[in-house]
């Protein structure tokens, strides 16, 4: 039997409303909450997620989570088994940080597999407050999903908050 690659699915909507095994959070290195997706996940997920994040800071992640890395917590009240927090790079004109953004997707997918997840939902990491250009962010996200989707993951869902982000991912998926 040959393993099927994961289905890559695009959804326009709010990531906190998804029913999946893993919801990925575009966190910041403090792990203690922020705006955008991060704020929405903590608001909808309730205090249990922040409690887990505080425990991580008090143990293995005293200095916070490095850019490009990923760590899992409870999903609290969200309709998911876990939240995986990953820290995207801030966009820079001077420095090529694409490998770090790819690493966010790769590490999150690897961790999701370790957790036994079959379905995972991603936001468009770094494309908000961190100003990563949407088209390139979408290309990197889709490439990582294609390269690292198998074998146990069945669905990799990208949840795009607005029409512009949705179109960028649609174009990347066609390419
Ligand atoms: P970053 O700091 O990594 O740029 P942001 O949360 O500011 O993270 O934005 C990442 C992307 O997530 C942006 O494209 C933003 O429009 C989108 N976004 C914001 N809130 C939500 C949400 N509730 N669900 C899905 N995507 C969201």
Image (cartoon, grey):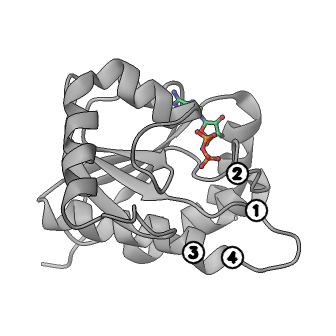
Q: Which residue is mark 1?
A: 91
Q: Which quadrant does the C terminus fall into?
A: bottom right
Q: Is residue 127 above or below residue 142?
A: above
- Is tag 4's residue or tag 2's residue first in the polypeptide sequence? 4
- Is tag 2's residue or tag 1's residue first in the polypeptide sequence? 1
Give the residue displayed 45% in from the left and 77% down from the top.
147
Residue 8 % position (x, y): 44, 53
Is label 4 in contact with label 3 (beta carbons under 8 Å)? yes
Residue 1: quarter of image: bottom left
Is label 2 in contact with label 1 (beta carbons under 8 Å)? yes
- Is tag 4's residue or tag 1's residue first in the polypeptide sequence? 1
Q: Where ligand 1 lies, by image quadrant?
A: top right
Cα distance, mark 2 to mark 1?
6 Å
Residue 41 % position (x, y): 39, 30
Cα distance, mark 4 to mark 1?
7 Å
- Is tag 3's residue or tag 2's residue first in the polypeptide sequence? 3
Q: Which residue is mark 3?
A: 100
Residue 88 % position (x, y): 56, 60
Which structural element holds mark 1? Answer: loop
Cα distance, mark 4 to mark 3?
5 Å
Residue 82 % position (x, y): 20, 44
Disc 2: CA contacts within 10 A as few (<14), some (14-19) or many (>=20):
some
Is label 4 in contact with label 1 (beta carbons under 8 Å)? yes
Q: Is residue 110 left or right of residue 40?
A: left
């Amino acid at each position: 039997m040959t393993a099927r690659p994961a289905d890559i699915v695009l959804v326009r909507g709010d990531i906190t409303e998804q029913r999946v095994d893993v919801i990925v959070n575009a966190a910041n290195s403090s792990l203690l909450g922020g705006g955008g997706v991060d704020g929405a996940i903590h608001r909808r997920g309730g205090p249990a997620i922040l409690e887990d994040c505080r425990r991580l800071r008090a143990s293995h992640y005293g200095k916070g989570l490095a850019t490009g890395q990923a760590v899992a917590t409870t999903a609290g009240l969200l309709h998911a088994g876990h939240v995986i927090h990953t820290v995207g790079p801030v966009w820079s004109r001077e420095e090529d940080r694409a490998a770090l953004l790819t690493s966010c997707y790769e590490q999150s997918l690897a961790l999701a597999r370790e957790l036994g997840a079959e379905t995972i939902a991603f936001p468009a990491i770094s494309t908000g407050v961190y100003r990563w250009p949407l088209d390139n962010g979408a290309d990197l996200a889709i490439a990582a999903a294609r390269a690292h989707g198998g074998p146990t993951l069945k669905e990799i869902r990208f949840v795009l908050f607005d029409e512009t982000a949705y179109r960028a991912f649609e174009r990347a998926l066609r390419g």
